[in-house]
Structure formats: C-alpha cells, structure tokens
Image: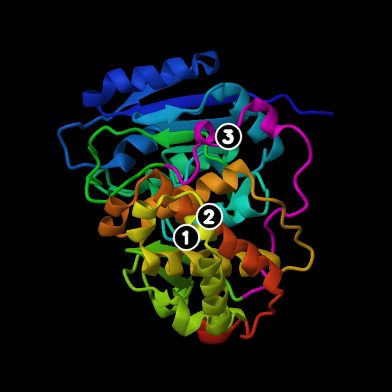
C-alpha cells in the first residue's frame, strides 16, 4: 500500500531577489510554498544563514521538505515530476540539481546517465548541491537543529549538508536529469568566480516529462563500482582522473588531477589502446561527418583526443561491472556529454567551434564511450591503493 506523501516547500531568498523568489513559488504553487527571507541581508554573504531557517520551516504534517533557492529555474510540470521522483526514493536526500562542472557529482551523474539510471549516488565528500534539496521530514528537522550550531556568518550550507548526511547515514542521490537549473542572476553568495553554474543535464533540455518517472528502475542502476573508485574530469581541454583520497588530505576541489595517459592503467586501460582507437576514429572521418571543409580545417584535434579519452574511460568504468547493462545512448546521456564539453573545453577551443564542430566533438566522445564499453577491460589495481575510497 502506498504511503500518503505530503511535500512542503520553502523558497529561501535574499530581499534583492524577492521577485525571482516569488516566480519560483508560483511555479510550485500547488505545494503551498512559503518564502523565507535572509534575516540579515546586509551582512556577510551566507546561504547558510537563510538555509537554517528554511529547513526549520518544515511543518508538522509534512512527510518531506524541499528547500529551493531564489534563482532556480523549474522544469516543466515540476510538481508532477518532483512527486513522481520522490515516490521512488522516499527515504533519501534527493538533490534536484548537480552543477555541470562539479568535480565529482557531475561525473557521477553522467555515469548514471550512461547506465540509463534515473539516480546518481552523490559524493560523500564533495559539497551536496543545495540549490534544490529534498529531505524526509525527520531528517529535515534534524538538519535544521544541526545547522543551528553554525554561526550566521558561516557561508557554505552545502558543505555542512554533506557532513550531516555522512554522519547520520542519510543516503543522498541526485535526479538524472536535474529537475531544476541555475538561473543567470549575479551571485549574492560570493560565487561569482565559480564559472558556469548550469546543470549537468536539465530535464527540459533532455526531452524528459513526467512519464519518465513511471516504471521500474533500469537494470544498469549505479551500485558498487568494480573499478578503483574515481571520477573523470574535462578541464581546460584535458582529461583528468580524480582518485578520491580523503585520508591524504587532498581537497575535493584541488586544481590538480591525474592526467589520463599517465594513470589510466590503474583503471585497467592501456593508453596505447586509447590512442589507437582515437587514431582509427579520426582516420575514418566520422568526426568530420557533419562538417564542411572550412570547419574541418579548424577542428581542435588535440582537444578531440582528450574528449575521446574521457568517453573511452567512462565506457570502461560503466562496463566494468559484469552485472551492469549499458543501454544505447539516450537523450539524457547525450545532453550530459554536451555539457561536459561546454564546461571542460578551453576557451580557445570553444571559440573556434561552430555547431557542426561541436557536434563532431560530441560524437567523438560518444564514439570513445562505445569503444571503452566494448573493450571489456578488468581493473588492474587493488582497491586500497594509496588510500583510495569511494568518491
């Protein structure tokens, strides 16, 4: 028998964004959202100062509580999609958004999309995306109490939520795709230097509607990882491996990754095999299929290699578990690859690409992914190497 669900909503906002906050509230009006203003808008920028009050606004009759920030864009048919998703994961912390260039969570979302899953397990160490976060009511109230211990000028509510969920054993997942996106308003929280803050995959950009949340979970749902735990990053047109080593004291957002060519053997992949597959792909002309001669002349070949390597190693990752079924490329996965390139290409490479060149790079990444899936490689390193653990 299905348990009755009552979702409450709080929209936290800075007074300078009241108009935007009210627009967000109108987008989910049937859930009777309340507006929670920053109690000290002239004070130091601090999302946590308002978040602690937004989480405390969970009413007695609610089964779940959702906190939205004032600059979000809601997916079409948001309330129906939200309730459909929550019914599938009623005991979880559910993030409705993951930043396309976050070091760990964006990769975990892309990996889940490659497997055809509607859920991505979130990192236990990277910040939890709090642009739109839903918790079961008991955890929402406990989080409000937990946050009370932080001074109002403490800034990072997303870091505090990560620690809360990890210490309390609250499983945290992200919807795939994201049900909200980040708007384009200037940051009032001091995040103006963080680059693009759009979603890794926004539902409206992937052809997803409310019916997507019906039916059973795909067979390839992410679970235990057969390979050495890691994430992959495209940064400045380079493919980097990120091994999670919390015991080593490495910050999650360190600027230094492990270059794929030097370290992919730890994942069971041969750099020579990656290079050979890329050369074959380029020689076949598939990368240039949608381009004219002028476009092909300025195609960023070096970036294409890095994009191929990223796709290849993602394919190796998702196919390493013999129980995982890797489906055909879905619109959600394709969109996640497009945003991977948007976030990861160096500015000169982005500037030289038109729509045809960009499409060629997307196809190069997807071709690399298919090659990695078919490689059938096995992990070559022990799971306890260098203190590496789940990201």
Up-down: is 19 above or below 321? above
Q: Tell me the magenta residue range.
A: 199-227
Q: Quick one: 253 or 317, which is closer to the camera?
A: 317
Return the residue at label 2.
Answer: 363
Circle count = 3
Q: Residues within 10 Å of mark 1 (few under 14, many from 20)?
A: many
- Give the x, y percent position of residue 370: 64, 62
First reached walking from the N terminus: tag 3 or tag 2:
3
- Residue 1 highlighted magenta (yes or no): no
- Give the x, y percent position of residue 257: 39, 73
Return the residue at label 3.
Answer: 137
Q: Marks 1 and 2, how far apart in space?
A: 23 Å
Q: Quick one: 249 or 143, which is closer to the camera?
A: 249
Q: Residue at 46% across / 80% down in the picture?
A: 261
Name the mark nearer the viewer: 1 or 2. Answer: 2
Query: Which quadrant: the N terminus?
Result: top right
């Amino acid at each position: 028998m299905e348990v009755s669900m009552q979702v409450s909503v709080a929209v936290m906002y800075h007074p300078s964004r009241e108009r935007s906050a009210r627009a967000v509230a109108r987008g989910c009006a049937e859930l009777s959202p309340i507006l929670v203003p920053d109690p000290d808008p002239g004070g130091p920028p601090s999302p946590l100062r308002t978040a602690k009050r937004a989480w405390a606004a969970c009413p007695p009759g609610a089964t779940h509580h959702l906190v939205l920030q004032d600059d979000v864009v809601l997916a079409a048919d948001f309330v129906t999609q939200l309730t459909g998703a929550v019914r599938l994961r009623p005991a979880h912390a559910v993030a409705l958004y993951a930043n396309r260039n976050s070091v760990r969570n964006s990769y975990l979302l892309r990996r889940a999309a490659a497997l055809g899953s509607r859920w991505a397990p979130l990192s236990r160490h990277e910040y939890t995306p709090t642009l739109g976060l839903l918790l079961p009511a008991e955890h929402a109230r406990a989080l409000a109490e937990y946050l009370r211990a932080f001074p109002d000028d403490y800034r990072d509510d997303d870091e505090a939520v990560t620690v809360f969920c990890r210490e309390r054993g609250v499983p945290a997942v992200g919807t795939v795709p994201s049900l909200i996106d980040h708007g384009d308003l200037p940051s009032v929280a001091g995040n103006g230097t963080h680059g693009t803050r759009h979603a890794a995959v926004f539902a409206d950009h992937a052809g997803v509607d409310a019916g997507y949340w019906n039916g059973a979970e795909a067979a390839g749902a992410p679970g235990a990882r057969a390979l050495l735990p890691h994430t992959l990053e495209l940064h400045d047109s380079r493919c980097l491996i990120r091994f999670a080593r919390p015991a080593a004291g490495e910050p999650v957002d360190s600027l230094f990754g492990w270059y794929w060519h030097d370290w992919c053997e730890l994942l069971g992949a041969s750099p020579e095999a990656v290079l050979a597959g890329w050369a074959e792909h380029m020689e076949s002309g598939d990368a240039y299929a949608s381009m004219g001669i002028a476009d092909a002349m300025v195609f960023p070949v070096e970036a294409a290699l890095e994009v191929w390597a990223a796709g290849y190693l993602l394919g190796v990752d998702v196919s390493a578990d013999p129980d995982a079924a890797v489906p055909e490329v879905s619109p959600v996965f394709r969109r996640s690859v497009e945003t991977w390139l948007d976030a990861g290409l160096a500015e000169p490479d982005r500037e030289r690409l038109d729509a045809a060149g960009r499409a060629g790079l997307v196809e190069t990444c997807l071709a690399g992914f298919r090659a990695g899936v078919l490689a059938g490689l096995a992990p070559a390193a022990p799971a306890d190497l260098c203190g590496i653990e789940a990201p």
